[in-house]
Amino acid sequence: MEEKKEIHVLVFGGGGAVGALYSYLLSISPLAKVHTTIVCRSNYPTVSTAGFTLRSALWGNHTFQPTKVYSSLDEIEDTSIYDYILDTTKSHPDAFVGGKPPLARLSPFLPETTPIIVIQNGAGIEEPYHLAFPKNPIASGVLYITISQPAPGEILQEGKVNHLRIGPDHPLPEKEQEKIQFFGDVLGASCKVTVHKDIRCERWRKVAWNGSWNTICAVTGLDTQSFIKSSPEAKELVINLLREIVITAEALGVKMDPIDSLIKDHVGWTIKAPPIVPSMLQDARKGAQMETEVLCGNIWRAAEKVGVETPNIKYAQAYPSEVTRRPY
């Protein structure tokens, strides 16, 4: 019997629900022996001593302990041992230094051959990583799943949706693409993963939903069903937001589905689904910082560069920064 290959994965943001889940799924992959090191912050005291408890509709109930747990990137002594870096933090540009994300602290010490995979919402999220790691292969992930952390170290996954799409935002050399494919294969042995050679279409498909539904729910303080029933004009507003985003993507050279078909799909399934509380509304209700820059700001700035008017996106972004002050 052939011995499984050992790989080491550093998960920055591993204390969050997404990072914790994928740390677990990597650790149970039958295709490799994966050692996971996670960096977490507020839940470090719990996770470092007791690990995580997972309650999942798809994977059952488990407790698991990552190989190593750190409270800061600064505690990591040797980055050369890691075959992959997985960043699952939320993108908040105001935490960047010189346009570079917090992970950039590893840049002077990380081998240039180490792939970095970033699972984040939003448009243009790869650029800060290209700036910080100009020679490393960079891929980003577009995730569809319902997952939360109701208490420190307790991960709750609900529903049947489970799909991670990963790939670069521009073509990689064959050997670097093979590394991304191998990561996808190892993780994909435990969950649904699709590896792309160009992730931009998939990213903008999700940006279209997030930039419309996620934004408007945060602005109004309503879940998807409550919003669509709130006014005869509600549906039209969502459609206008979607149209601005899709036209922007096409102007940037991203090959999208036909605009009317994509709008019909994004509006249709959301209206038929049970009430959804999107991530920005969840953050607003908790008084947490929202991803307004990557879900709104990056869209209209990209649109301006290619001459696309986005009045609704600009108007929407004026409000989420104030939403956290509302008492829900």
Image (cartoon, helix red, strand yellow):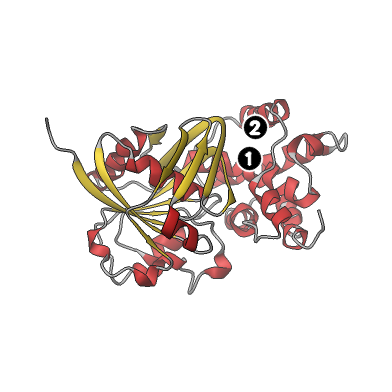
Q: Is residue 142 left or right of residue 70?
A: right
Where residue 254 appears, as percent x and y from the top left, is 50, 42
List x then y, in percent, for residue 147.
56, 42
Categorize mark 2 by other alpha carbons within 10 Å: few (<14), some (14-19), many (20+). Answer: some
- Circle 1 packing at 10 Å, graded few (<14), some (14-19), many (20+), is many
Q: Quadrant of residue 4?
A: top left
Q: CA distance from mark 2 to mark 1?
A: 6 Å
Q: Is residue 98 visible?
A: yes
x, y percent for residue 168: 38, 47
| Residue 306, label in figure | none
The three-letter code of the residue at mark 1 reads Trp
The quarter of the picture where residue 161 lies is top right
Q: Which kind of residue does numbered mark 2 sit on?
A: His
Q: Which residue is mark 2?
A: 266
Location of residue 246 in the rendering, given as x and y in whole percent from the top left corner: 61, 41
Q: Is residue 270 above or below residue 104?
A: above
Quadrant housing residue 74: bottom left
Q: Which of the labelled discs sits on residue 209, or is there none?
A: 1
Residues at badges 2 and 1 in contact (C-beta under 8 Å)? yes
